[in-house]
Image (spheres, rainbow, N blue to C red):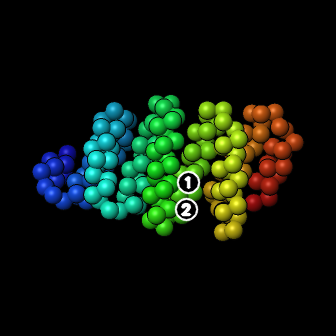
C-alpha cells in the first residue's frame, strides 16, 4: 500500500505497475481475491506503458489463475493466452509452455478435450526435444486423465506407461 500510495501520482509507469502487481500478490496470498483482482486491473491499465513483456506476462498469469478459481473459464483462457503471448515475446519459452498447459487444463475443465489434448501434445513435442522435464510429466498425466474421462482406456494406458518410464 505504501508503494502504491507513493507511485500512484508519479509518471513512473514501471514502478506504479509493480506496486499494484505486488499489492495484488499480497492480497492473493491472503485469499482476498476480490482486492487482488482490483489491484491487477490497475496494473493492467499500465501494461502498455511498462514495455516489459515478462512483467505483463506475470500479471496475466495471475489474472488467469484468479478467473479459474472463480470458474470464469473464458476469461481465464483469455488471460492465459495473453500471458503466453507476452512470455513468447520476452523469450521465456518455459513460462509460455506452462501457460499453454494451464489453458489445456481449463479446456479439460470445460469438457473441450480435443482442444486440451491438442495443446498437451504440442507441449509434449516441445518438451521432449529438451529431454523431458516436470512439464512433460504434467502433460502425460493430463493426457491420461483426459483419456480416462472419455473412456479411452487403452490410450490412457499408453500415456501412463510412457509416464512411468520417465
Q: Please state the horizontal and vertical placement of residue 68, each as a whole percent of the image.
A: 49, 36
Distance from the alpha carbon under mark 2 to that under mark 1: 6 Å
Q: Quadrant of the C terminus?
A: bottom right
Q: Is residue 164 left or right of 7 when viewed as pictured?
A: right
Q: For the point 71% across and 41% down, which residue is it?
A: 114
Residue 22: in sight, yes or no? no
Disc 1: CA contacts within 10 A as few (<14), some (14-19) or many (>=20): some
Residue 9: in sight, yes or no? yes
Q: Quadrant of residue 52?
A: bottom left
Dot 2 and dot 1 residues touching (CB under 8 Å)? yes
Residue nearest the observer in this picture, 96 or 85: 85
Residue nearest the observer in this picture, 9 or 115: 115
Q: Quadrant of the N terminus?
A: top left
Determine whether 103 is above or below 69 in the image.
Answer: below
Q: For the point 27% across and 52% down, which residue is it?
A: 46
Query: Dot 1 corresponds to which residue?
Result: 98
Residue nearest the observer in this picture, 64 or 82: 82
Q: Which residue is farthest front?
A: 48
Q: Please state the horizontal and vertical placement of residue 158, each as a whole percent of the image.
A: 84, 49
Determine whether 81 is above or below 165 in the image.
Answer: above
Q: Is residue 17 left or right of 82 when viewed as pictured?
A: left
Query: Dot 2 corresponds to which residue?
Result: 94
Q: Which residue is farthest top?
A: 71
Q: For the point 51% across and 35% down, which residue is it?
A: 74
Disc 2: CA contacts within 10 A as few (<14), some (14-19) or many (>=20): some
Q: For the point 79% across and 48% down, which residue is it?
A: 160
Amino acid at each position: 500500500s505504501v508503494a502504491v500510495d507513493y507511485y500512484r501520482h508519479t509518471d513512473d509507469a514501471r514502478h506504479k505497475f509493480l506496486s499494484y502487481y505486488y499489492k495484488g500478490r499480497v492480497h492473493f496470498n491472503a485469499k482476498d481475491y476480490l482486492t487482488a483482482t482490483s489491484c491487477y486491473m490497475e496494473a493492467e491499465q499500465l501494461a502498455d506503458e511498462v514495455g516489459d513483456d515478462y512483467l505483463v506476462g506475470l500479471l496475466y498469469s495471475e489474472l488467469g489463475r484468479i478467473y479459474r478459481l472463480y470458474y470464469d473459464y473464458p476469461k481465464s483462457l483469455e488471460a492465459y493466452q495473453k500471458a503466453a503471448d507476452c512470455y513468447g515475446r520476452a523469450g521465456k519459452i518455459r513460462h509460455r509452455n506452462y501457460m499453454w498447459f494451464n489453458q489445456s487444463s481449463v479446456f479439460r475443465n470445460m469438457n473441450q478435450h480435443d482442444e486440451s489434448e491438442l495443446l498437451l501434445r504440442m507441449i509434449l513435442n516441445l518438451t521432449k526435444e529438451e529431454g523431458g522435464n516436470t512439464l512433460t510429466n504434467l502433460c502425460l498425466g493430463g493426457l491420461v486423465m483426459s483419456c480416462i474421462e472419455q473412456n479411452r482406456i487403452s490410450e490412457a494406458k499408453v500415456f501412463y506407461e510412457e509416464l512411468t518410464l520417465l
